[in-house]
Image: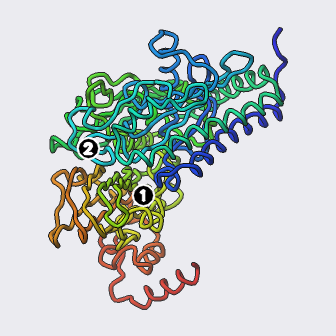
Amino acid sequence: MTNPPLDAITLSVIQAALQQVCDEMDLTFSRAAFSPVIAEANDRSDGIYAAEDGALIAQGAGGLPVFVGVMQYSTKTLIERIAQGITAAPEPGDIYIVNDPYLGGTHLMDVRFAMPVWRDGKIFCWLSNTGHWPDIGGAVPGGFSASATAVEQEGLRLPPVKLFKKGQLDQEIYAIISSNIRVADQRIGDIRAQGAALEVGAERLGEVLDRYGDDTVRQAVAELRGRAATQMRALIAPIPDGVYRGEAYVDSDGVVDAPLTIALAIEKKGDTLTFDFAGSSPPCAGPMNSVLATTLSSVYLAMRHIFPEVPLSAGAFEPLIVKRPEGTFLDAHYPRPVSGCAAEVSQRIAEAVFAAMVKALPDKVTAAPAGSSGNFALGGSDPARGRDFVMYQISGGGYGGNADHDGLTNGCSTIGISKSPPVEVMEQAFPVLYRRYALREGSGGAGRQRGGFGLAYEVELLRGEARASFVMDHGRTGPQGVLGGGDGKVNEVTVWRDGQAHVPKHLSKEQDIPLKAGDRVAVGTPGGGGYGDPFRRAPEKVLHDVALGYYTTAEAERLFGVVLSGDQTAVDEAATAALRHR
């Protein structure tokens, strides 16, 4: 006997309830975590996944979009390995841990937990979350080994194993993890927080199931998945049939000083889009390879940026067909290093999607955003506290301009909504002082709608010794402008040692740079690309930007074709008006 169709109100309430379960998991994870990168930057995500195939049911609104497809792929792989007898079958209270990038992951620092939700002795669904651990071992503190040539150099790789068995932490597995990572005594806080988030999710989901019934919720999940697919197809259908091409470039792989190309052809036919990366660069020596799960998720998140109104569900991805990019650096296999795949390559993939789709949807797609997470890891010893530390800094940049308005300044990365930890928290937790933390004037690409501005910061090591490592990008070419807009400024890294400036050979990638007290690291993140002909920008907007110091008079005249020289009165009046408006 089939259940009667759900009414719209019940369906909406269940949809919101599932979203709320994920949001509460996110909140629990961040509030209980020890590491600033999780507790403050929110570099984490939680979701609900189908028991049969790991398909996404719901994900927290505050979670990283790049983890959407990744955790779906990872959960599917876990289910398959359990069915094949490779991984031990679950029992109530079990929580698996996995970070193997080749089994549906990103890089080793993104550690995933997965827990089945039991109902009447059967698995109803899986809960999974991912948190960025500030260290996972490997050659350098923080795991971002810019010159790694094998994954073993990047850290400890874990296949799916039970970290919690029947609700109890497996001390032997935990000992293995602790013996292979830095500042191991501090990881127990993150582990407990990650597990607690899943426990809270199971409790809240149980309340939803008790209230509406398992069959009704199961029916709602199927209906929501179908509706998400239908909505995505409806948004794709009006796009003219044809092939749309876009390219993006990775500065280098950190080992070979030459750019990597992402070549993308998107074929629109009917109500589907097919993504083909044939012609992209082959697998690379350094850590800028991308595993398949990350490549898929990068396409999904790019389309989510374009069509944000489609609910998060596996159904939203069904009309998006991604050909496996075999033989390219976007389909990495063991032992290729991958530390840059989630934080950097994923954003170049999204940029290629934007570059292609802006031709089809110029009113919906933006110019390229900054597209770098600005991964900066600093590890050393703090003599004042008598303990080691690993600091991980992420940073924002400018968004691309679009048809309606200028790009956002110092926005989070394309792949997520994680934010830079507050300066005050970082200075309290680590022996550093931020000498500067400011908007990076002039970094936005010129356009009818200009790109947003990046961030400029400078951090000094106050005491002890440390080693700095970077895996960033967009140091060779800036984020692309579109439809005549200019590119945003490139990422810049300068290390000051004994008063002498050092710029990495690979511009934004280097590892193991020794620092002592008084040495400083200065970073300027990219601005977003400009949208449209900059000479068509409204003169009052140009004047406003100059008045606020975003561009110098000379820059504005050169980039936007306006004449401001000798009209200081107008600039002063615009500055006064802008300050009054603020």
Q: Which residue is under mark 1?
A: 396
Q: CA distance from mark 2 to mark 1?
A: 21 Å
Query: Compared to 439, does 367 lie above or below?
Result: above
Bin the neighbour count of mark 2 within 10 Å (Cα to Cα): few under 14, some 14-19, many 20 and up. many
**In this view of the protein, can residue 242 be seen by the observer?**
no
**Left or right placement of residue 6 versus residue 72 in this view:** right
**In this view of the protein, can residue 453 be seen by the observer?**
yes
Residue type indicated by callout 1 = Gly
Residue type indicated by callout 2 = Ser
524 and 7: which is toward the camera: 524
Query: Compared to 328, does 67 lie above or below?
Result: below
Q: Residue at x 22, y 41 (%)?
A: 253
17 and 486: which is toward the camera: 17
Callout 2 secondary element: loop
Q: Mark on residue 498?
A: none
x, y percentage for residue 35? Answer: 47, 52
x, y percentage for residue 34? Answer: 50, 51
Question: Which quarter of the image is occupied by the N terminus?
Answer: top right
Q: Residue at x 70, y 35 (%)?
A: 18
Query: Compared to 386, does 179 lie above or below?
Result: above
Bin the neighbour count of mark 1 within 10 Å (Cα to Cα): few under 14, some 14-19, many 20 and up. many
Which mark is first along the chain, 1 or 2? 2
Q: Mark on residue 145?
A: 2
Query: Compared to 481, does 568 lie above or below?
Result: below
x, y percentage for residue 71? Answer: 51, 31
x, y percentage for residue 23? Answer: 65, 44
466 and 331: which is toward the camera: 466
Q: Nearer the viewer, mark 2 or mark 1?
A: 2
Q: Residue at x 40, y 71 (%)?
A: 438
